Image (cartoon, helix red, strand yellow):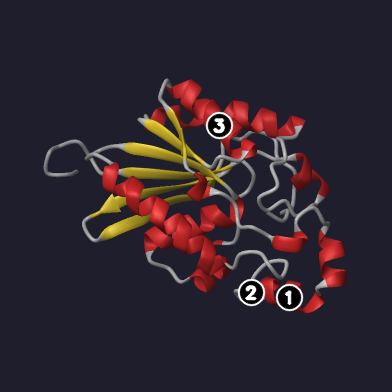
Amino acid sequence: MSPDGLGPRRLVVLRHGETTHNAAGIWQGQLDSPLSALGEQQAAAVGPALAPLRPSRVVTSDLQRARRTGESVARACGVPLVEDARFREIHAGAWQGLTNDQVTERWPEERAAVLRGEDVPRGGDGESMADVVARVGEGLQALVGSMAAGECVVVSTHGAAGRAAVAWLLGLEQELAWRVLGSLGNCHWAELVEGRQGWRLQAWNASSGAPSRPGTSPP
């Protein structure tokens, strides 16, 4: 409990619902792909699931898959929705729009490096995770600085950007976060609570229990 009796501050880092590209195993990066039918179901369920945390606002990436997911939370909780492009997904360069098989065939060494957890620019001219951490961290610094005691805020974002956000808050190196945390499932979230010595992970890959497709998909 904080000294003012309002409780600790909380952040919920939420990945968007499944997209048509996720379902097809396509690298989307910053392509503005829509939610699939399953993703719409997931988004509809996540708002009521997060309502008991009583968020005061939702901050969302400006890409439609994150915004649609964030809208569900804002609507269910009766709170405002604000866009912040700093919470966009990693830009995957020339990989965007290609399947995993196509990426592996054309960029075998770079794809293998990513799978090993190495930080290389995606698709040659795309972003590295260090680039994502820099912009997501800037967004989080501004957001946390604006939060009042006891406030809960939901950040509707993406897979790689979401893990980067959680690692930034926890002070984890990205390689360690990649190895230990893995990825957030579609419409799954992490809950972080601020303690006396910083932020701690309260929950990882929590979900509403809505149907999901097995396996993981590229950003």
| Residues packed near mark 2 inside 10 Å, few (<14), some (14 to 19) or many (20 plus) | some
First in sequence: mark 1 vs mark 3 = 3
Residue wearing tag 3: 46
The one nearer the camera, 168 or 29, is 29
What residue type is disc 2 on?
A: Val
| Residues packed near mark 3 inside 10 Å, few (<14), some (14 to 19) or many (20 plus) | many
Residue wearing tag 2: 120
| Left or right of 208 on screen, residue 110 | right
> Judging from the image, what secondary structure is the residue with disc 3 in?
helix
What residue type is disc 1 on?
A: Glu
| Residues packed near mark 1 inside 10 Å, few (<14), some (14 to 19) or many (20 plus) | some
| Left or right of 46 on screen, residue 124 | right
Toward the left, the furthest residue is: 3
Q: Quadrant of the N terminus?
A: top left
User: Where residue 65 sits in the image (x, y, percent)?
Assistant: 64, 38
* Distance Cα–Cα, label 1 vs label 3: 35 Å
First in sequence: mark 2 vs mark 3 = 3
| Picture quadrant of residue 2 | top left
First in sequence: mark 1 vs mark 2 = 1
Location of residue 118 with respect to 188 vertically, above or below: below
> Judging from the image, what secondary structure is the residue with disc 2 in?
loop
Q: Nearer the viewer, mark 2 or mark 3?
A: 2
Residue wearing tag 1: 110
Task: Note whether residue 55 is visible.
Answer: no
Location of residue 94 with respect to 85 vertically, above or below: below
| Left or right of 83 on screen, residue 92 | right
* Distance Cα–Cα, label 1 vs label 2: 7 Å
